[in-house]
Image: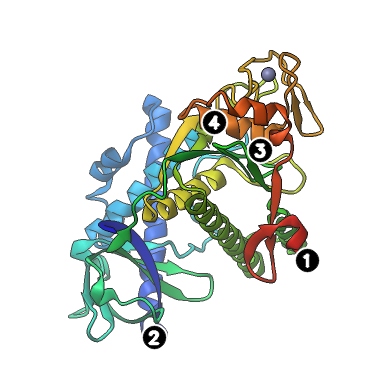
Amino acid sequence: MAKQVVTRTYTASIRNQQQVSDDLDSLGFSASKLWNVGRWVCDRVWSEIGHIPGHNELTSYLKSHERYDDLHSQSSQRVLQELAEAFTGWYGKRRNGETRANPPKYRKHGNEHPRSTVTFKAAGFKLDTKYGRVRLSKGSNLKEYWSDFILCEYKTRPDVDLSTVESVQQVRAVWTGTEWELQFVCKVEGKVSEAPGEKTVGVDLGINNFAALAYEDGHSELYPLNCLKQDDYYFSKRIARCGDSDSDQATRLNQKKSARRTYYFHALSKHIVQRCVDEEVGTIVVGDLSGIREDEGNGESKNWGKHGNLDLHSWAFDRFTSMLEYKAEMEGIAVERVSERDTSKSCSCCGRKRKVNRVERGLYVCDECGTVANADVNGAENIRQKVSPSSPSLSVNRSNGWLAQPSTLLFDKDTGAFAPQEQVTS
Ligand SMILES: [Zn+2]
């Protein structure tokens, strides 16, 4: 086993919540105010010269602004960086044709400011792992007398020991909706295994089957993620009933919904990596969804967000792919992102590309070679072939209908893991 340094984030509760929550509140409010000042500057610069300033420009505009000194300079810098990133994310969505995407909003509810996350970098915190304390720096405007820092007593999960990590790079104070918690972003020395083998698997992410996998030997698997759909439906209905989408109850429901989603993504990415270990896969090839809308109009596009009640946008797939990447990395498996262009139009068996994609009841039908394949598996196989061309002996398997009969695996609520359809009872 080789060793490698990787980044991990550990969450910790704050033991002396009562003593520090007022101070953390003022920092959280200040971060929102600085965000709004930055947001306003973006509007102004845009209307004057038709350009939205990036992170460095924003910092040089605002570093002499009064609000900048409410936080430690590195914390203020991070707020403006987040704002610039939010704009970049928005351009990306617009480029991909998500016309409903909105630019980053002001952080304000009437006269109230929400509590934004505050990030402390190297010069802004001091960690004492022996006594489980961390000192967080305030900005010069908020310092009173000798108290220029907030002293938090933290408690991590029992299996996490911050004194054993390589280094703690950042501390984040995050408002959960009910209290403050801390996140420690650490460099951790992890054990990385040798790759389990040299085979490849193609992964097609989508809305009907969240993931379709096509292995090199021709067999395939589908992960429909029905649970996520049910959950989404249930929570959306309850959130709609709240009326006010900014209410505490709606916020709590949204948090719960996203926590459950995160859980599914973790469970599925973990499962897929384990399957790759079992199947001696060394490379996972996954469709890169950032260009998803480029072929809109000729049947190639996937209509995100319009399918039933599942409101999954490309960022959800991005997030899932990142989880897959870091879990695979620990097993020595590489993840390659490739363009999805033409992967749903072409026949993975003979390579024929259709002008109009003929998909009948989820099946891809090729009238050149007679292949009938599950449409998502056909896509996954095309994605796989972008990295590893098919071997001719496999076309026999394929024409025998292999790709039309993938095994379906479902999330089992009783065990919290994925299992073949026929074994899942819940
Ligand atoms: Zn064909």
Question: Of the residues shown, which amino acid type is indicated by label 4?
Answer: Ile
Above or below: residue 279 compared with residue 190: above
Q: Which residue is mark 3?
A: 304
Image disc number at residue 383: 4
Q: Nearer the viewer, mark 3 or mark 4?
A: 4
Q: Nearer the viewer, mark 1 or mark 2?
A: 1
Q: Earlier in the sequence, mark 3 or mark 1?
A: 3
Look at the numbered disc 1 and give the secondary structure of its residue: loop
Question: Of the residues shown, which amino acid type is indicated by label 1?
Answer: Thr
Disc 4/disc 2 C-alpha distance (Å): 49 Å
Q: Earlier in the sequence, mark 4 or mark 1?
A: 4
Q: Is residue 265 left or right of residue 180?
A: right
Relative image position of residue 361 (x, y in whole percent)? 82, 33
Q: Nearer the viewer, residue 249 or 269?
A: 269
| Residue visible at 48% across and 38% down in the picture | 200
Image disc number at residue 15: 2
Q: Earlier in the sequence, mark 1 or mark 2?
A: 2
Disc 3/disc 2 C-alpha distance (Å): 42 Å
Label 3 beta carbon within 8 A of ligand 1 = no
Q: Quadrant of residue 182?
A: bottom left
Q: Quadrant of the C terminus?
A: bottom right
Q: Is residue 220 visible?
A: yes
Look at the numbered disc 2 and give the secondary structure of its residue: loop
Q: Quadrant of residue 191?
A: bottom left
| Residue visible at 73% across and 64% down in the picture | 242
Q: Furthest-right residue in view? A: 361
Q: Nearer the viewer, residue 66 or 396?
A: 396
Above or below: residue 106 compared with residue 101: below
Disc 3/disc 1 C-alpha distance (Å): 30 Å
Disc 1/disc 2 C-alpha distance (Å): 41 Å
Q: Earlier in the sequence, mark 3 or mark 2?
A: 2
